[in-house]
Amino acid sequence: MRRRLSTAVATALSVFMAGSVAAAGPNFPTRVDLPDGWSPEGIAAGTGTTFYAGSLASGAIWAGDLRTGTGSILVNAEPGAVAVGLAYEAARDRLWVAGGPNGQVRAYDASSGEILEVYSFAGAGFINDLVVTRDAVYATESFAPVLYVIPLGAGGALPDPADAETLALTGDFTFVPGAFNANGIVAARGWLIVAMSAAGELLRVDPATGEASVIDLGGGSAASGDGLVLQGGTLYVVQNFFNQVAVFRLGAGLASVSQVDTLTSDGFDIPTTAVFRAGRLWAVNARFTTPPMSDTEYWVTGLRP
C-alpha cells in the first residue's frame, strides 16, 4: 500500500493544484484540500498564510496557502521516507521533519525544498514531533522515554550529524510500554511541554536535563493528546481519536493548566496536528480509520477558537 501511495504522490499528484475550499467568512475557508492519497499527519505554518503538510505514505511535503487553497509539492516522494511532525524555523527559513519509524530528523530549505541535512538516531522506534528553539531542535520519541536533541551552532548553524544527542526523560511521568507515549511538543517560558498520548498527561520538561514533571490539568483532559499549539498563554491540545481540541490556559511556572474550552468541528476526521494563523486554528486530518487509498480525500480544517 505504501509503495502504491508513494507512486501516486510522485507522479499523478506532482502537478496537482489544490483549489477546492469551503467558504468561512471573508477571505478564509473552513476546508483546504490536500492531494488525494496524501496521508498527512504533520502540519507547520510558514510565512504569511503558507502552510506545509507532510505525507506518511511517501515523505513528500506539500506547500499550500490557507487563504486560497492552492499549493504544490515542495519535497518529492522518496522510497522509505516518512513525514510525521513538522516544524518551521522562521529565522532560517528551514523546515524540520520528524521521520517516524525511519529514525531520522531531516532539515529542508523551506523555499526550495532542498534537503540541507539528515540526522539519524540509532535504535529509534518512532520519532514523532519536534520543536525548534534558539539553541536546539527537540524531537519526541514515542516508544522510549527520551528526547532527541540537535544542538544549533552560532547563528543557528546546522551541526554535524555526529553532534546530535539523546536526552533521557527522567522524573515524575508515566511511560506505557508498547504504546504511543511522547507525542506533540512545544517550547514555553524556558521549558518544553510534551503531550503523553497513552497516559493522557502533559509534561513540563527541563530542556537541559530532561527532568519531567506532570502538569496539573485542574480536572481537564488531555486524553489522546497529539499535536500541541502554543498561542500566547493558551495551549491547544489536539485530541486525535476524540475529534476535538482541548484549550488550556497556562498557569504560573507551567506547573498547572486550566481547561477553558473544547473545540469541535464537523470537518474533523481524526485531526492530529494543528497551527494557528490569521486568528484561526488549522488542523490536518489524518483519517486513520479510513483506508489510505490513492483516491482517499484529505484536508485541513480551519475554525475560529
Image (cartoon, rainbow, N blue to C red):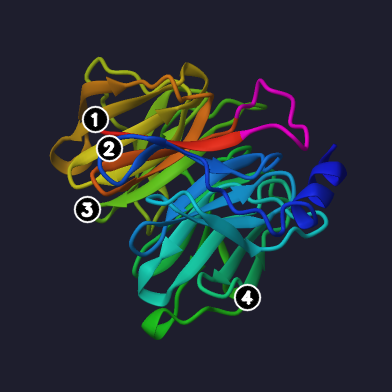
Seen from the viewer's position, the closer of residues 26 and 186 is 26
Q: Which residue is mark 4?
A: 114
Q: Which residue is mark 1?
A: 248
Seen from the viewer's position, the closer of residues 302 and 173 is 302
User: Cβ–Cβ below 8 Å for labels 2 and 1?
Assistant: yes
Residue drawn at point x = 54 percent, y = 78 percent: 159
Q: Which residue is mark 2?
A: 235
Q: Residue 168: x percent and y percent?
A: 52, 49
**Amino acid marked by disc 1:** Phe
**Amino acid marked by disc 4:** Glu
Relative to 133, 292 lies left or right? right
Seen from the viewer's position, the closer of residues 214 and 202 is 202
Q: Which residue is mark 3?
A: 189
* SS category of the residue bearing label 3: loop
* SS category of the residue bearing label 2: strand
> Vertically, is 213 above or below 68?
above
Residue drawn at point x = 61 percent, y = 41 percent: 40
**Amino acid marked by disc 2:** Leu
